Image (cartoon, rainbow, N blue to C red):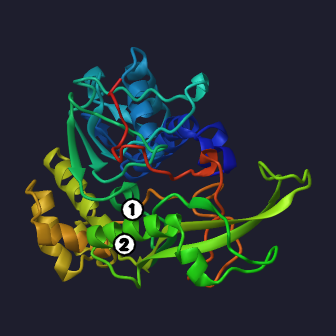
Amino acid sequence: DDLMGLAFGIGRTGVRAKSRRALDELLPEALRALARTHPQAVLETLHIDLFGFSRGAASARDALTRLNRADGRAWLREQLHRTGWQLANEAAVPARPARFVGLFDTVVAINPQQRDELPDVALPAGCAAKVVQIAARDEHRYHFALTSVAPQHEEIALPGVHANIGGGYDQRIEGPKLLTRPLGQRVAGHGLADTEVPPLHLLQGTQVYRQARAACQRWQAELGLGDDAVWVDVWHRWQAQRVAGSASVLPQWVLYAHAAVVLKRDIDGRYQWVALRLIQQRAAAAGVRWLADADDVAELTLPDVLRPIAARLVSGQALDAAQEQLLRQHYLMQSAHWNFDALGDTALLYAADEGTRELPYRPGPGLFYINRPTEDGKRVVLPNV
C-alpha cells in the first residue's frame, strides 16, 4: 500500500480501489486462466467465495455489494462470456453468486467525510449463502472499530486482538510498548542545578512513579509476567518557562518527572493459525474445496500446547482459566498502547535516564497516539449497515 492507502484507507490502494481491482482485474484474470485449463467445459453453476482481513474484509464486503446489485448478474455473465466460458443456461449465474464469505475482524477506519471512499459494507440477510466473521475479542483501540455482521450473520469472538485474528505477521518480540499513558508532574524543591541530571531516587519518589508502579503490578498480574517483561520507566525533562508568582519575567528552568509502564517480551505468533482453521472449517461446511487442510501445511503447524485450545475454540467451547492465562502470557498481543508514533510502531525517542530500560516514548498530544485504547477499555462496534 502507498501512504494514503495504509494510513487512511483511501486513494489508489484504498479499500474501494482494491474492491474495484478485485472485480475488474483479478476476477477476469482468474476466469480466463481457468477457462484455458478447461477449454471444453460448460459452466453449470457459478459460486464465488470471498475472504478478507481488516480493511481487506471491508473490500470483500464492498465487492459483495457490487455483485448483488441489480445489474450485477448481467455484469458477471458478461465477464464469463468475455473470458471464454460457455454457460449451460442463464441460471448458471445466480442472482446471489456468493456461496461463502469469510471475514477476519472488519475494520474500515476511513474518515466518514471521505464519502466517495467509503465502502458499502452492509451485509443484509440473504446476501450470500453463508457469512461468517471472526472478531477479535480483546481488541479495544480507539481507531479500530469493528464493523459487525450480526445479527443477520454468524459472528464468532475469539481471544486476541486484531493481528491475532487476521495474522500475517512474524513477530518474535513485542515492544517496547507503553501500556499506560505517560504521566508527568513538576518536581519542586529538588536542590539541583539547572539542567542537572536528577538522581534516580528523586524521580522514584514522585507521585507519578508511584502511580505507574501500582499500574505495573496490575498489568503483571493480568498478563502473568514479571519485572523482566513489564516494568516502570521513569525519566526527567527540563523546561524553560515563566513561573507563576515569580518576581522574574525571564524563563526559569523547571524540572518535570515522567513515568509509564513498559512491556517488552517474546511473543509466539502461531496462535494466528487458530482463526484460519475455524474459517476453513466453516468454509468447507459451506461447500468450499481447499487445495490443502491447514493441519497438513508445515508452515501452519500449531505447537502442541495450542492444539487443545484450538480444538475447543473451533468447536465453539469456552477456554478454562489456565488456557486463557497461557494465551495472555505467550500468544495474545497488546495492540492498545501509548507509544507516540506517526504510523504504527515507528516511535519518536526521548532522552534516557538511569531509570529507563528502554528509551521511552516522547509524550505527545492524543492526536498522535494512533494505537491508544478506548476510554472504557471496550471495543467500539459499528452496526451491520
The residue under label 1 is 167
Q: Which is nearer the eye, 301 or 257?
A: 257
Q: Which is nearer the eye, 303 or 28?
A: 303
Q: Are marks 1 and 2 in contact (CB under 8 Å)?
A: yes
Dot 1 or dot 2, earlier in sequence: 1
Which residue does the image show at 22% across and 61% down from the upper left? 277
Query: Where's residue 22, x and y in %?
Result: 50, 41
Within 10 angstroms of label 2, few (less than 14), some, or many (20 or more) residues?
many
The residue under label 2 is 269
- Residue found farthest to the top: 70
| Vertical comparison of 353 with 76: above or below | below
Answer left or right for 109 relative to 8.
Answer: left
* Amino acid carrying mark 1 in the image: Gly
* Amino acid carrying mark 2 in the image: Gly
Q: Which is nearer the eye, 40 or 234?
A: 234
Quadrant (top left, top right, bottom left, bottom right) of the C terminus: top left
| Vertical comparison of 72 with 216: above or below | above
Distance, label 1 to label 2, CA atoms, is 8 Å
Query: Where's residue 151, x and y in %?
Result: 20, 29
The answer to which image quadrant residue 99 occupies is top left
